[in-house]
Each structure stands twice: as C-alpha cells, then as structure tokens.
Amino acid sequence: MTVIDVFNGDADGICALHQLRLAAPCESTLITGVKRDIALVKQIKAEASDKITVLDVSLDKNRDALLPVLDSGAEVTYIDHHFPGDIPERQNLTTHINTDSEMCTGLIVNELLGGEHLAWAVTAAFGDNLLTTARTAAAPLNLSEDELEKLQTLGTLLNYNGYGSTLDDLYFPPAELYKRVQPHSSPFSFINEDGAFTTLADGFKSDHERALSITAERATDDIAIYIFPNDAFARRISGVYANELAQENPTRAHALLSELDDGSYLVSVRAPLNNRTGADELCRQFETGGGRKAAAGINKLPATELEKFASAMSSQFQA
C-alpha cells in the first residue's frame, strides 16, 4: 500500500495536510506544485491498495483525472472548498467539500479532527485572507494579540511562497516547505526555529515595497485592475498583494495581472470583502480560470482578451 498526499502548494494546502499528518503520522508520497498548478491529480499513478488524500484543489478541474484513479480501486479522500461541479458517486471516494466563502480547507480538516491542531487551521485561514474568520476560530486558543499577528504573518508568508508561474519563482518548492513545517506541532516553534520564516519575511518585504510603487491601470468605485511587469517578484507578490488591496478597499473588487513571457497575463482576482462572491464565476469564463467565490485566478489570459476580461469584471461586480 502506498499513501499519496496531493495538496495545493499554498498556506491552506500545506496547513491542511500538516494537521492530518500530525493526527495520523505516516510516510507518504507528496504531489504538489506552485499554487496555480491545480491539475495535480493527473500525476497520481494509482493501484488498488493505495490510500490517496487530495487537499485544496478543485474537483471540477481534476474530475477527468480523478475517474481513472477511482477506477483503479484506490481509496480517495477529497477535502476542498472550491467549486466541485458534479461529484462522482463511487464507494471508494469520500468527499468533504464546503464552498462557503468563509471556509478554507484547513478549517474543514480542523472540523474533521475536532480542533486537535487548531493553531495550524487558524494559520491556514489567515493565509486565505479570512482574517475575521481566523480570529473567531482562534478564540479557544486564548492567544495574545501578538501571537495572533504572528500566525497571520506566517499564513501570509506560506501563501506568498506558493505564487509563481514555475517553481523557479518561489523561495521554496512547496513540498520542501511542507517538510520543513512537518516537525513542528506548533506554528510558533516553526516561526522561532526554522530559517525559512526569515527568508520568506525578507523576500516578502522586498517584493511588497516594489508592488507599492505600481498604480492601478483602471479604477472605478466597483473594480480596480493592476498590471504588473514580467518579473518573478510580481508573480510572487500577486496573490498576497491582491488580498491586501481587498482589505484596504472592502467595497471594491480587485484584479492583479502579471505579464508572462509570451505577453499573456497571470491573473489574481479578489471579490469585494463586503460581498465575498463572484470571483470564481468571473474567472471560469476564461479557459484557464478557476478558484473560489472570494478569490480566484486565471493562469493564462491572452493579451487579446484583456478588454473582454475588464468588461466581464465590470459586469460581475457592478454595484
């Protein structure tokens, strides 16, 4: 029997898997990648005796690859908060999917484990920009304000590390970052003892300062669209900076477009915080788009479709 863990390379995916493996330690084969690499299930080479867990990647985007895995007889547990589409009805598939805009995969796992490793679930929620939800969930921990801010910083940095077009854009491949998190039952020991935290904090500070110098290409009361240059810093900071813009302007939707080598764009979209819905609907109108209600993206928006995107975004989020 082989245990295979498939997880999104962002804060939510890492923290969700970490909770599960703290509760049920085992050696497993890891399948992950940059945050936008969600077509992960196709990498599974399944046999009937395998036990597979899939975390924080859309079933809708992986359904075609999931079916042959199920046909192999392998036992699959699917835990996620993205739009799933039609869920296959198979005896060897167990799903825990909740698309509520205030839910993340780490919080779903936390419910399944009865709060056993709540601090890591709170970190996941902070990483997914669910700031109020994270603080509410953290109440049983009786943390100080300083401790809450440390978990928010950790969630932000784990999320920041996941963004990029390729692994070369990242400070740490997500599988390596997960392995560095793995020895730590407490997020605070990881913060205090692993140099990866300082590396990510320094990188984030530098990238964030560059992002602040870029102004919106177009902005209305309802939407704002930013276009970032073809540079690794832009791809790394895109998602976290989009979260920050959403927090600063809660009545407005935001899109951050990073130019790619071929002139197309990597797109991060955030719905208004006062109405966390519609981001996935917007992005699914484009071939490589997907995500969740509050936050979604497009892996490759052709430059010829930029005006179409701007028009669709205006229509999606008009007051």
Image: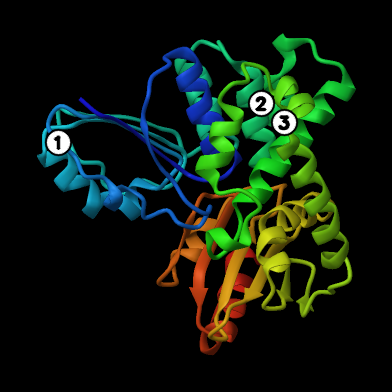
Image vertical order of residue 319 relative to residue 153, above or below: below
How many C-alpha atoms fall within 10 Å of the one at disc 2: few (<14), some, or many (≥20)? many
List the residue tagged with mark 2. Answer: 122
Q: Are marks 2 and 1 in contact (CB under 8 Å)?
A: no
Q: Earlier in the sequence, mark 3 or mark 2?
A: 2
Image vertical order of residue 190 relative to residue 177, above or below: above
Residue type indicated by callout 3: Asp
- Which picture quadrant has residue 123? top right
Q: Earlier in the sequence, mark 1 or mark 3?
A: 1
Q: Position of residue 118 (x, y in %)?
A: 62, 17
List the residue tagged with mark 1. Answer: 47
Residue name at image x 62 percent, y 16 percent? 185
Judge left or right: residue 317 versus residue 72.
Answer: right
- Which picture quadrant has residue 47? top left
Q: Nearer the viewer, mark 3 or mark 2?
A: 3
List the residue tagged with mark 3. Answer: 194
Q: Is residue 101 visible?
A: no
Residue type indicated by callout 2: Val
Residue name at image x 75 percent, y 21 percent? 188
Tell me the CA gap for discs 1 and 3.
36 Å
Q: Position of residue 184 (x, y in %)?
A: 63, 20
Residue type indicated by callout 1: Glu
Q: Are marks 3 and 2 in contact (CB under 8 Å)?
A: no
Tell me the CA gap for discs 3 and 2.
19 Å
